[in-house]
Structures are given as structure tokens and as C-alpha cells.
Image (cartoon, grey):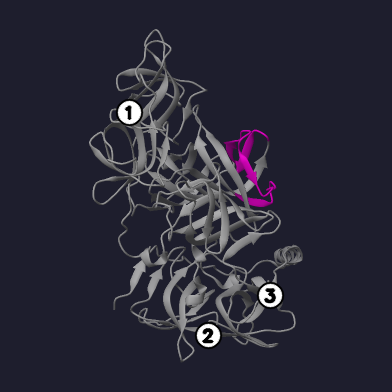
């Protein structure tokens, strides 16, 4: 059997035996009264009955993504300045890298009420461009954003998207570490009501026309292994040796919520290409091409569902076009459609007019990333405020990206964030990622004609294309000192994303601008404000210094820009890592 099982984190439920006792009649009367009171205040919606069948606990409501600052001996960590408390049941996933100071981690848990997190799970991840915090918005003022009791500073430049309400809405926060310590929010975005299951962007993928996606409850599977017929929300699902099984949220056990991707065969079975556990949902869901629609039934991607007079139609669903169907599973075992919606591949919240969708880049502006992109069928406006996350790869035509933005009157999207994603076909094979490269050096050679082509900078081959941003020109000559930002290629060259000419007279006299690169040799005893030692030079970091990265540590190579005082101390204007 050659089934691929990914991210296995199986847990064994513990059942505590309850010893029955005979209570005195008056105690029974009190208990009966309490139960009646509870039933009066507790309302269980019928549509949520299916959710209660799941053995998978709800996904933790608060998530923190950032660098590990400290690892204490008594299960006390600090992640991105936030105290994190571990217990004997905290799961620590170190498959990407070992847990160590400086490594990045995602912490899932609940606020402790005093600004920290009680961790249920910690996963070590690759370095990310920003610190992220998700959870219930518990406070919002002109100076502070509070998420599940964790305080994040807010400035006049912090973007607030969607008018989130404290105590009501779940939010996602992008943040950086301030020079004096503590987090500063770059953006706070409403993600929806707190009592709704959080959206997992990885659950919804483009290409529903290629088959069908079923979201539902796993009710049965073969006892002797994985291969064979499973049942998910009343649908017969065929699992083969080629099926990819992903235990992302929890184990693939009966009662778990799962997403099945595949196609229906002649026998009416959904042949699974991939199955993975997901967070609980209110409704079952089917995504695919609408093949038939009558007053009492419909067929989507080969799967048959029922319909009645209460079924809602949204967005003018038509045959031969993709749809999303929310459904319930009544006693008959056949999915009953609650809502049938035309599927344009995006998730839109009409109240906040924000859009999130995944698609492939069809076209880009000439020579720059700023301007209008075509992503799938949507026009996307990209500006200097758009956060472009390329840590998984370069933006290019054909690349799969996730876009978050606001909806404009002309139906284009003003992008707030664009993240390069890997395609599903890459989930289970080695990735040919290109490492981000940034360095300063002198130009040693240039192309014979113009600037497009191969340069040599500080002994490195640098490829300049029409997409490379050249700053400080318009001319570049051999001997110029430049800062290069780009991606290392397999042949040893660097594909330049940006080249900036450095100011002349780099190490000037008193009062002149200076720029240099070196390793951090020492830092202030607490925080980042104060005196640093970089490459043997005293560097003063104050409240006006712009720190471009989320965290710094002794040994990091950095580029320092500032001016030199008469006593030789460099007052830093800007510091960024020179990876």
C-alpha cells in the first residue's frame, strides 16, 4: 500500500469513567431545577447538529506567528514579545526546524487574560516577512489594538479594514517589533464574527471545473486500512493507493470534518485525489460545475443533491458554470441544498467590501510590480501600500497567488496583500525555492549594450531584466557601489528585483551621510534603543531610527545608514538585515 500520509498528529481521546451514585431526593430536585434553567438559556440550532457529531475539537481561536525571543526552562517562552505558557499537553511540531531562539513559530492557544497565550500547539515555521496575530478583538483605541488580551500598539499609519468591533469580530493583525520593544500593528483586518469558524484559505482552491470538492463529516471508513470505500456526508468516497491523505487539523477518524477533492466515476463514487481534515463548519458543502438543476434536485460535479422550496439561489447559478452549495444532511442520508451560489472563486464580505481569492497571475505591468495585474478573471490594482509576500517564490505570470483587498466601484480590487502560493501539485514533492539575496558591492562589469543582461557585482553574477527596479540612476557605471535585492538562482546567479545606487562618499567625515554593512557584535541590554556595536563601529539607535526587520540578534549582518558624529558614533537613520 502506497498511501501518502502527511502531517500526522494523531491524538487518543481519553474517556473518564463516571461512577453513578445514589443522591438524596432533595439533591436530585436541585439538579433537576439546574438542568431546566440550563435548557432555558441554551438554544441549539438544528443546522449545527451535524457539527456536534465531530470528534475533532474546534480550531484554537487565537494564533500568533513570530520569532521566538526566549525559551525558559519552566515551559515559559516568549514569542514576538508575547509570553507563551506551555503545559504537558502542548504539542510542539519541530518538523521544519528545531525550536530555538530566533526560529519562527506559530502558536495556537487562548489568551491568559494578562497579555500572554496558553499554548495548545506550537509549530516551527520558516521565517515570515511579518508577525501575525489572529483572534477575538477585545479592545480598539487610537493607540492600542487588543486581541484576546494581547496588546499591540497602533499608529496613525495602521490600516483598519472592515470596521471590526471589539467583543464581536475576529481580526487578523500584521505587525512588526518596535525599536523600543513591543508590537506595532501595520494592518488590522476584520475576518468575520468570532462565533463563526475561521476561514482556512488553504481549504478552498481554484479549479472546481476539474472535478468536485466535498466538505463534510467522515462517517465510515474501512476497518483494515485506508484503501476502500469511505462515506462522507452520505457520499460514497473511493480511496485508492494514490489518494493523498492529509491530517492537518486532526486525525482522519469517524466524526472528523474533511475536505475531499476528486471526480465521480461511472459507479457514482467520488474517487478521492486528496482528503484532508478541516475545521468544523456549519453546513456541508459541495463545489463544482452545475450539471443539472430542477425544482427538486441538482447535480454538481457528478454528485446528486436534493432541493426544496426553501433553497436559496444566489448569483444566478446556471448549468455548466461553477457553483458552491451549502447543504444539510437530513435523516434520509442525501444532502439537501440550503443555498446554491454561483462561484466566481472568491470570498467576499459585503459589509466590509473586502475580497479574498486565489488565482493565477495572467498579466503584470511592464517593468514594475505597481499598476494593474490580471489575476484569474479579476483586475487587481497594486500600489506602494500593497504587501507583496514572495518568501515562497517570485511573482511572475502563471504563478498562483492569494489576493486580499478592497472592492472598487469598477469591480477591480485594490490589493492590500498578495501572497505567492504553491500549487496543489507541489504539495508532496521537493520545492525548488529561490533564496532571497541582499548585498552591497561595487559594479565590476556591465552588459555591452544597455543595462539589461548580466552584471558582475562584488564577484557575483547579477541578472537584470525589464522587471528589475533601478534606483539612483539614470546611469550606472563600473565602480559604482550598489545595493542588490533579488533571488539566488540554481546556476549561482542572482535574479535582481531591485538595484539601488549608493550615495557617493559612503564613509564620510563628521555630519556626512554614511552607509556600511557588518555583523552585529553587541546590542543594548534590553530592547533595541541604545548603543549597538556593528563591525567595530558604535551605532546609536533612537526613536527616529527606522528598523526594517522584525527582530535583530548578535551575529546578524545588517546594513546601517546614518550620519557620523564628531566623536565617531554613527547615529542610525535606518538599519536592515543584509541576508
Q: Percent position (x, y) of residue 306? A: 64, 85
Q: Is residue 148 visible?
A: no
Pointer 2: residues within 10 angstroms few (<14), some, or many (20+)? many
Q: Nearer the viewer, residue 438 or 545?
A: 438
Q: Residue at x 53, y 81 (%)?
A: 301
Would you call the spot at circle 1 few (<14 residues within 10 Å), some (14-19), or many (20 or more)?
A: many
User: Residues under labels 3 and 1: Cα distance?
Assistant: 59 Å
Q: Which residue is tagged 1? A: 481
Q: Position of residue 166 (x, y in %)?
A: 68, 46
- Which numbered disc flags the more N-terminal residue, 3 or 2? 2
- Residue 537 on image: x %, y %: 33, 18
Quick one: 216 or 346, which is closer to the camera? 346
Q: Cα distance, mark 1 to mark 2? A: 62 Å
Q: Nearer the viewer, mark 3 or mark 1?
A: 1
Instruction: Quadrant for residue 113, please give it.
Output: top right
Task: Check disc 3 and report the residue beneath it.
Answer: 316
First in sequence: mark 3 vs mark 1: 3
- Which secondary structure lies at badge 3? loop
Dot 2: what SS? loop
Q: Which mark is residue 302?
A: 2
Amino acid at each position: 500500500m502506497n498511501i501518502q500520509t502527511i502531517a500526522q498528529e494523531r491524538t487518543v481521546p481519553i474517556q473518564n469513567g463516571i461512577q453513578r451514585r445514589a443522591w438524596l431526593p432533595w439533591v436530585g430536585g436541585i439538579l433537576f431545577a439546574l438542568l431546566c434553567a440550563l435548557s432555558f438559556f441554551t438554544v441549539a440550532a438544528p443546522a449545527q447538529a451535524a457539527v456536534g457529531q465531530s470528534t475533532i475539537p474546534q480550531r484554537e481561536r487565537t494564533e500568533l506567528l513570530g520569532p521566538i525571543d526566549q525559551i525558559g526552562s519552566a515551559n515559559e517562552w516568549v514569542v514576538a514579545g508575547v509570553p507563551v505558557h506551555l503545559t504537558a499537553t502542548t504539542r510542539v511540531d519541530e518538523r521544519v526546524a528545531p525550536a530555538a531562539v530566533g526560529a519562527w513559530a506559530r502558536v495556537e492557544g487562548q489568551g491568559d487574560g494578562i497579555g500572554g497565550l496558553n499554548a495548545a500547539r506550537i509549530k516551527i515555521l520558516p521565517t515570515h516577512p511579518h508577525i501575525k496575530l489572529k483572534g477575538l478583538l477585545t479592545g480598539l483605541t487610537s493607540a492600542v489594538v487588543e486581541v484576546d488580551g494581547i496588546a499591540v500598539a497602533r499608529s496613525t499609519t495602521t490600516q483598519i479594514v472592515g470596521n471590526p468591533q471589539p467583543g464581536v469580530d475576529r481580526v487578523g493583525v500584521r505587525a512588526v517589533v518596535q525599536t523600543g520593544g513591543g508590537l506595532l500593528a501595520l494592518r488590522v483586518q476584520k475576518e468575520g464574527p468570532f462565533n463563526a469558524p475561521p476561514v482556512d484559505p488553504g481549504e478552498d482552491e481554484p479549479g472546481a471545473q476539474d472535478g468536485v470538492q466535498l466538505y463534510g463529516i467522515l462517517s465510515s471508513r474501512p476497518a483494515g486500512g485506508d484503501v476502500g470505500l469511505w462515506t462522507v456526508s452520505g457520499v460514497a468516497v473511493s480511496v485508492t493507493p494514490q489518494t493523498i491523505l492529509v491530517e492537518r487539523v486532526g486525525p482522519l477518524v469517524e466524526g472528523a470534518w474533511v475536505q475531499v477533492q476528486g471526480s465521480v466515476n461511472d459507479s457514482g463514487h467520488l474517487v478521492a485525489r486528496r482528503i484532508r481534515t478541516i475545521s468544523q463548519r456549519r453546513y456541508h458543502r459541495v463545489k463544482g460545475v452545475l450539471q443539472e438543476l430542477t425544482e427538486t434536485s441538482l447535480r454538481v460535479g457528478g454528485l446528486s443533491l436534493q432541493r426544496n422550496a426553501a433553497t436559496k439561489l444566489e448569483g444566478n447559478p446556471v448549468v455548466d458554470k461553477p457553483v458552491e452549495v451549502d447543504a444539510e444532511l437530513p435523516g434520509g442520508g442525501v444532502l439537501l441544498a440550503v443555498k446554491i451560489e454561483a462561484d466566481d472563486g472568491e470570498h467576499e464580505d459585503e459589509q466590509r467590501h473586502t475580497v479574498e481569492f486565489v488565482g493565477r497571475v495572467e498579466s503584470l505591468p511592464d517593468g514594475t510590480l505597481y499598476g494593474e495585474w490580471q489575476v484569474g478573471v479579476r483586475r487587481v490594482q497594486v500600489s506602494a501600500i500593497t504587501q507583496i509576500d514572495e518568501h515562497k517564490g517570485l511573482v511572475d505570470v502563471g504563478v498562483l497567488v492569494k489576493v486580499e483587498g478592497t472592492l472598487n466601484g469598477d469591480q477591480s480590487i485594490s490589493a492590500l496583500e498578495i501572497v505567492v502560493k504553491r500549487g496543489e501539485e507541489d504539495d508532496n514533492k521537493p520545492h525548488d525555492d529561490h533564496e532571497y539575496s541582499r548585498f552591497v558591492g561595487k559594479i565590476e562589469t556591465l552588459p555591452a549594450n544597455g543595462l539589461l543582461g548580466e552584471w558582475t557585482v562584488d564577484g557575483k553574477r547579477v541578472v537584470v531584466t525589464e522587471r528589475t527596479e533601478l534606483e539612483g540612476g539614470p546611469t550606472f557605471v563600473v565602480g559604482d557601489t550598489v545595493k542588490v535585492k533579488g533571488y539566488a538562482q540554481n546556476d549561482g546567479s542572482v535574479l535582481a528585483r531591485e538595484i539601488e545606487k549608493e550615495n557617493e562618499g559612503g564613509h564620510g567625515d563628521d555630519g556626512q551621510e554614511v552607509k556600511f554593512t557588518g555583523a552585529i557584535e553587541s546590542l543594548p541590554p534590553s530592547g533595541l534603543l541604545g548603543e549597538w556595536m556593528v563591525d567595530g563601529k558604535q551605532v546609536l539607535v533612537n526613536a527616529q531610527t527606522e528598523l526594517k526587520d522584525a527582530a535583530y540578534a548578535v551575529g546578524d549582518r545588517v546594513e546601517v545608514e546614518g550620519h557620523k558624529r564628531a566623536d565617531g558614533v554613527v547615529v542610525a537613520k535606518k538599519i536592515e538585515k543584509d541576508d
